[in-house]
Image (tube, rainbow, N blue to C red):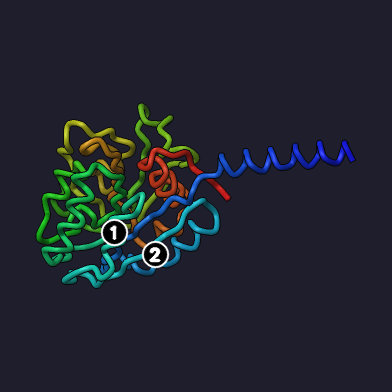
Amino acid sequence: MRQLAVVLAIGLLLAGTALAEAKPPLKVCMLSGSGEYKSDESLTAFKPFLESNYNVTCTLIKAGDKGKGLPGIEAVKTCDVLLVFVRRNTLPEDQLKVVQAYCDAGRPIVGIRTASHAFQNWLEFDKKVLGGNYRGHYGGGAKAQIAIEEKARDHPILNGVRPFASSYSLYKNTGLADDVTLLATATAKGKTEPVAWTRIHKGGRVFYTSFGGPDDFKDPDFKQMIVNALFWTAKRDVEKK
């Protein structure tokens, strides 16, 4: 009986320790509204991938390409990380204030592809928050070869990420904010541009990549980069299930 009591006590102690160490799921709020690059399709598939493989719960908010609002945007207020994949949405003033308040509070942000021109009535989001300099894009028709910056090879966002290629047009972004940390560039048709970087905005971590078309979301290296970015911006290690 005495041995049984000791075993039970140890079991309870270990269980209590495990509970104390367990972290709540990372709450990711995804804003989707980039019809040109099928963000709904990609994020609808990415959501269960995240939730099945990582300690993550997602809220996916959908809107049309060049829409007039994001119904359900109130979820932004309580998320841990905001993922933006929207294209030229004109938000009503009350919804825009939700996004701006989130950014002004220095909270974590991950921007994908058209996030550089996500909000038509707040195009400053690109330079002021993401640290970008979006000026259109080159023509398509050639694979963009992604190269990881030598100085950034040990960055947590690039952990397990190998150089990959994208079939989508290269965005013009030369002239980034002075305080960005460049992670990767890409070259297509003899043109090279920055394609992935981080920065600190009002104390909060920000990550942006100019890629994110449907085929990119099928690439394991691209997906790993986004997973890493979600946890890094939240100042958490990647937590697998």
Q: Give residue 42's mark.
A: 2
Residue drawn 19% across and 41% down? 131
Name of the residue lying farthest toward the top: 151
Tell me the SS state at disc 2.
Answer: helix
Q: Determine which residue is flagged by label 1.
A: 85
Residue drawn 34% across and 60% down? 30
On-image quarter of the N terminus = top right
Tell me the SS state at disc 1.
Answer: strand
Is the residue under label 2 in contact with that under label 1 (CB below 8 Å)?
A: yes
Image coordinates for residue 161, horizontal then vertical, percent: 46, 42
Q: Nearer the viewer, residue 1 or 77?
A: 1
Residue 33 picture quarter: bottom left
Q: Nearer the viewer, residue 224 or 92?
A: 92
Image coordinates for residue 174, horizontal then vertical, percent: 17, 40
Tag count: 2
Q: Earlier in the sequence, mark 1 or mark 2?
A: 2
Whether residue 210 can be seen here: yes
Residue drawn 15% across and 38% down? 175
Name of the residue lying farthest toward the right: 1
Q: CA distance from mark 1 to mark 2?
A: 10 Å
Q: In this rendering, is residue 194 above or below 94?
A: above
Is residue 213 rendered to the left or right of residue 159? left
